Image (cartoon, grey):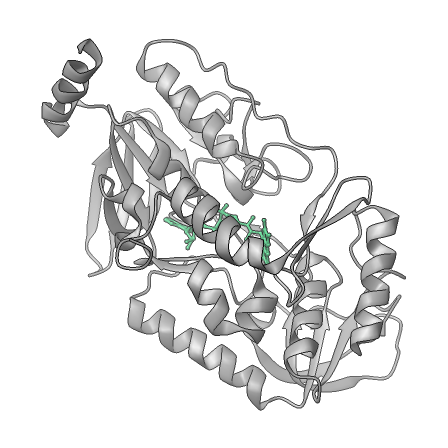
Amino acid sequence: MKKLWQKAATAARSDADRPTVLVLGMGDTGVLTAAHLPSRCRVVGVATKPLLVSGQELGCRLSDHEGWREDYLVPLNKLRRLARVEILHARATAVDPVGQTASLQMMDNTTMELAWDYLVIATGVGNGFWREDRLETQAVIEQRLAGQVASVAAADSIAVVGGGPCGTSTAFNLKRAYPNKNVALYMSGPLPLPGYAEVTRHYHRDLLRERGVALVTDRRAVLPDEAGLQRLAGGVLHFQDGSPDVRADLIIWTTGNLRPYTAFLPPDMLDDRGFVVTDSHLNVIGHRRIFAIGDVAATDPLRCSARNWAYRVLCKNIAACLDGRPPSARFIPPVARWGSILGLQPDGLRLHGPAGQGWRLPRWLVRWFLYPVVVRRWIYGGTMGRDS
Ligand SMILES: Cc1cc2nc3c(=O)[nH]c(=O)nc-3n(C[C@H](O)[C@H](O)[C@H](O)COP(=O)(O)OP(=O)(O)OC[C@H]3O[C@@H](n4cnc5c(N)ncnc54)[C@H](O)[C@@H]3O)c2cc1C
């Protein structure tokens, strides 16, 4: 009874009574964090796009676009758990940690100052044409996605440059979807997936070969400038060792040149590469009321707080602060990379552990239980008009 009364009392309070938590960036981690913050705070999310445009599964995005959209392109106003979050279609341009304000550029080009009690930085990174910080409407996003899919369909030869998980998955999935296209994967070392267990690396090399992807090993392509890395277009590849140039109808740069979106933050919050420096509570060092999460946060060498349930740690710590207690939940990152690399395949989802062990979840389990029930319903609280 007491609990019920407290709940009703909280709901009845006006926004003015409740501390404001401002979440900058509504991508994969900003959405999860905003969705799980305690109900006794007012949550405001700053989103460059009216949809969650996930950076996950580039390979599926380009090869099975309709399937990818179901799980990775979701209008923010359809996510049930975001119903109580005020979404501002805007981009952060400055943060004043002392005055506790943020400056925002709105969609109509006006500016706005917003006061916050706690700030969450979740602005992510840029690493290619599929992840950027532009303020965009849904129509522009749709047009851009359709253009990318059309470029892939029109190309006879595709060069994927960079043998990390994104490049490996992209090359594999494109060749599976388009067996008649020439798909080549260019790597600077002898095997794909540096940083993963040797067994996992060999397994994927063999799989790529069996699929028919041309593997070009130990060859470093000359990187274009920033704009070139962000472009999805055909062109000529040049190599650092002087190997003959290669022309491709489409070049996909997946070389992992990360650019954290942090130009709007005071430099004392950043490390020398521009990532936000946090402690194990995801608290920005030297700023008690500011937290960071996701690819933008320098939490550990792999910067893996976009995964591994870090949003729960962050939400618990903000709840503690609201109660006047110090943050105590800790983010404990895994020591090695793990997870799925190729995404969902016709025979299921294969996961690779840190030591190279592998498990396969059958496709029906992923399609009928893992995504719709665990991910969409349990983690995101369901989507209105989709699975309601
Ligand atoms: C199974 C799996 C597969 C994956 N596959 C891929 C893959 O194929 N390719 C890949 O690159 N990564 C991949 N990843 C990594 C994953 O995409 C990222 O770790 C994740 O998207 C990071 O989330 P984030 O919230 O930190 O950043 P994002 O999801 O990028 O969100 C950041 C958001 O902040 C916005 N933003 C930027 N600047 C501002 C600002 N000034 N004001 C307000 N908003 C701003 C951005 O526009 C964006 O909307 C994969 C991860 C997993 C687990």
Nearer to the camera, 149 or 60 = 60
Residue 2 visible in the picture: yes
> In which image quadrant can residue 348 be found?
bottom right
Residue pictured at 19% horizontal, 61% vertical: 108
Residue 262 visible in the picture: no
The number of discs equals 0
Residue 64, placed above or below residue 156: above
Residue 183 position within the rendered picture, expressed as x and y whole percent measured from the top left: 73, 80
Say whether residue 134 is left or right of residue 237: left
Residue 266, placed above or below residue 341: above
Say whether residue 18 is left or right of residue 169: left
Residue 210 position within the rendered picture, expressed as x and y whole percent measured from the top left: 83, 73
Nearer to the camera, 119 or 366 = 366
> In which image quadrant can residue 380 be found?
top left
Q: Quadrant of the N terminus?
A: top left
Residue 329, placed above or below residue 352: above
> In which image quadrant can residue 231 be found?
bottom right
Residue 144 position within the rendered picture, expressed as x and y whole percent measured from the top left: 42, 75
Nearer to the camera, 39 or 261 = 39
Residue 259 position within the rendered picture, expressed as x and y whole percent measured from the top left: 56, 52
Say whether residue 257 is left or right of residue 325: right
Say whether residue 51 is left or right of residue 253: left
Residue pictured at 12% horizontal, 18% vertical: 9
Residue pictured at 37% horizontal, 73% vertical: 142
